[in-house]
Image: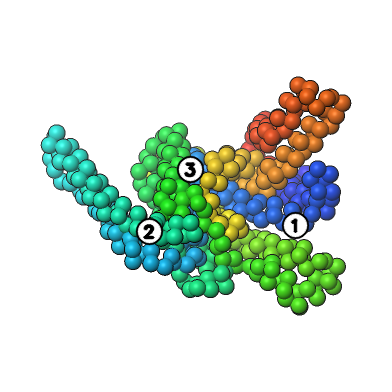
Amino acid sequence: MTISFRNVILAAVVASLYIMVGALDWGIFPGSWNTALTMLNFALIGAIMALGVNLQWGFAGLFNIGIMGFVALGGLAAVLISMPTTPGAFTAGGWYVLIGLGLGVATIVGAVKLYGWLPMGRLRTLITLALIVLGFFAFRSVFDIGVDAIEDINPAATGYLGGLNWGGENYKDNGWLTIVAWPVGGMFAAGAAWVIGKTALGLRSDYLAIATLGIAEIIIAIIKNEDWLSRGVKNVNGLPRPVPYEIDLQNDPGFVESAAAWGLDPVNASTLFTKTSYALMFTVVLVILLILAQRALSSPWGRMMRAIRDNEVAAEAMGKHVTARHLQIFILGSAICGIAGAMMTTLDSQLSPTSYQPLRFTFLIWVMVIVGGSGNNFGAVLGGFLIWWLWIMVEPLGVLIAEYTTAGFAEDHWFRIRMEDAAAHFRLFTMGLVLLLVLRFSPRGLMPEK
C-alpha cells in the first residue's frame, strides 16, 4: 500500500465515522444528522486550530501551549466587531479608559527608554522603579473611574462598552459582521503573538512552553475579570449569525414547502440548513488556510523553516536569522488559532470566558497534531477530525460499557458504583490510550511528514 493510497483510506475512514453518527442509531447515543453536523462544525474549527499549531511545531519546532489565549482573543474580536455599542457607555467612562490605557503604555515605554538612557548603577534601578510605581498609580486612578462608570450602566443586561455598532439597532440582521470578525480575530492573536514572541522566543523550548502557558492564563484572566471589556463571566449572548435563524426559516412558506418536498418537518429542516451552512463556510476557511499552508511548506521559506527546526546552529551558520523566522511562524500559527476562536464564538453565538479550558484548547489540539502527523498539514487536519470524533463519542460509549459490565450487580454494589463514576473519565483514558498507541506503532503520526 503506497503512502498516498494509505492517506486516502485514512481520510475515508474518518469521514465514514461522521456519516455513521448521522445514519446509525447508537442506542445510548441516538444517531442523527443534526448531531453529526454539530460534531462536524466543531471538528472543522479544531482542525483549523491544529493547522495553526502544526505551523509552529511541525514547521519550526516551537512548543506553544498557550493556544487558548489566542483562541480567546479571537472570540473577543467577534464581540467587539459584531455587537452594538452600549448606549452612554463611552460617554460615561470610555475616555477615562482610553486615557488610563494610554498612561499605562506611556509608563512602560518610558521605563524602557529611561533604563536604556541612564548609566548603569543603583540610581538607574531606583529611578526606573519610581517611574513604574508612579505610572501605575496614575494609570489606576484614571482607569478605575472609567471602568466603574461603564459597569454601572445596566449591569444586568450590558455593563460593558459593547462593540463598534456597525450594525446599528438591527445588528442581528448584519450577520456579515461576524465573518469580518474572523480575520480581525486573527489580527488580535497575531498582535499578542508579536508581543509574546519578542519577549519569549529567545527562551529554551521548555521555558517557552511555560511562558506561553502563563501569558495565555493572563489573557483569560483579563477577559474573565474586566467586565467593561466583554462582561467577564456574565457572558455576551446573542451575537449576530452569518446564517439564517431557524425561526425565520420556519416562518418562510417557500422553505416549509421545500422541506415538505424532502419529507422533513420545518423544525428539523431549519436546523439542518443552518448547521450545513456553517459547515460550508468553515470548510471554505479550512481549505483556504490549508492551501496557503501547503504553498508555504513547499516554498523556499518553508524549506528554510524546516532546516532551522532540524538544526538551528547549521541554519544560523548559513546566514539565517533564526529568531526572526521563529517570530514569523509564531505569529502566523497564532493568527490561525485566533481565526478559529472567532469562528467558534460565532458558532456558539456567545462569548463564555469560563469555557476556555486548557484541556480543550491545549491538550486536545496537541493530541490532534501528534496523532495526525506533526509536520504534515493534511495529517494535522485528519487528526483534528479523528480526535474530535473520539472526544465526543467515547463518553457515551463509556457509559454503555459501564452498564453492560455491571448489569448483574445490585445498585449499591461497589463495582457498579466504581464503574459508573469511571465512565465520566473515559474521555481522558481514551485520549491517553490513543496517544500511547500512535507513539508506539506510528511515532510520526498517521500521516507522517514526507
Q: Position of residue 288 (x, y in %)?
A: 59, 61
Residue type pointed to by label 1? Asn
Residue type pointed to by label 2? Ile
Residue type pointed to by label 3? Gly
Q: Position of residue 126 (x, y in %)?
A: 16, 37
Q: Nearer the viewer, mark 1 or mark 2?
A: 2
Disc 3 secondary structure class? loop
Residue position marked by numbered label 3 in the rendering: 66
Of labels 2 and 3, earlier in sequence is 3
Disc 2 secondary structure class? helix
Disc 2 crowd rating (10 Å Cα; few below 14, some 14-19, many 20+) is many
> Residue 34, labelled with which disc?
1
Q: Nearer the viewer, residue 13 or 67?
A: 67
Where the C terminus falls, by quadrant?
top right
Q: Nearer the viewer, residue 224 or 183?
A: 224
Q: Nearer the viewer, residue 407 or 356?
A: 407
Would you say residue 21 is visible in this rendering? yes
Residue drawn at the location 84% of the way across and 24% of the way down: 409
| Left or right: where 342 falls relative to 39 | left
Residue position marked by numbered label 2 in the rendering: 150
Q: Is residue 85 above or below residue 312?
A: below
| Left or right: where 103 falls relative to 5 | left
